[in-house]
Image (spheres, grey):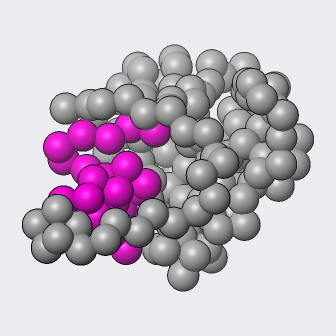
Amino acid sequence: SSSETKALFERHRPTHVIHLAAMVGGLFKNLRSNLDFWRTNVHINDNVLHAAHEAGVEKVVSCLSTCIFPDKTTYPIDETMIHDGPPHSSNFGYSYAKRMIDVQNRAYSEQHGRRFTAVIPTNVFGPHDNFNIEDGHVLPGLIHKVHLAKRTGSALTVWGTGKPRRQFIYSL
């Protein structure tokens, strides 16, 4: 909530913030809940950036997502392309909410001179990830599916066309 976020900033008085807060989920969770992803993440982002502004934070670095890029695009992609077309329809709520951080950062910079910026990391995975097949991201879900297929001796089914390009980074 905005009041809890404001209280957190008042209590700790940070000078620099790395904004990683988000409601996240895998493909099926996004498909079922695009509106929830949109509303929750827009509120989170606005709460964090506004509280940082009011607290006089010197620098905020927010974390975007690779899903913000247009669904239909040319490769290689870079950060100048994030608003060049709609994201994939499966997670448009989350994608547009993340894109709006870029818009908010620009507005805070232009109107208040704030140094708010964002990074777009590759897909992160690791041992503390969500390995749930329904709600996890692509790589942890795939690892879980491979594990189950190996354990049960069943066939491995992988969704999709095989055409999307993905990059991953391992994190503890």
Query: At which x and y percent is residue 94?
Result: 60, 60
**Residue furthest to the left:** 151
Residue 8 relative to residue 95: left or right: left
Relative to residue 53, is residue 6 depicted above or below?
A: below
The span shown in magenta is: 123-147
Q: Is residue 19 visible?
A: no
Question: Residue at 32% across / 41% down in the picture?
Answer: 125
Query: At which x and y percent is residue 121?
Result: 51, 30
Would you say residue 136 sits in the magenta stretch? yes
Foreground: 58 or 162? 162
Relative to residue 16, is residue 162 depicted above or below?
A: below
Q: Quadrant of the C terminus?
A: top left
Residue 57 relative to residue 124: left or right: right
Question: Residue at 82% across / 55% down in the picture?
Answer: 86
Foreground: 85 or 45? 85
Q: Quadrant of the N terminus?
A: bottom left
Query: At which x and y percent is residue 78?
Result: 73, 24
When asked about the image quadrant of residue 36, the answer is: bottom right
Relative to residue 103, is residue 145 depicted above or below?
A: below
The number of discs equals 0
Residue 132 relative to residue 81: left or right: left
Would you say residue 15 sits in the magenta stretch? no
Q: Is residue 31 visible?
A: yes
Question: Residue at 77% across / 29% down in the picture?
Answer: 75
Query: At which x and y percent is residue 59?
Result: 52, 20
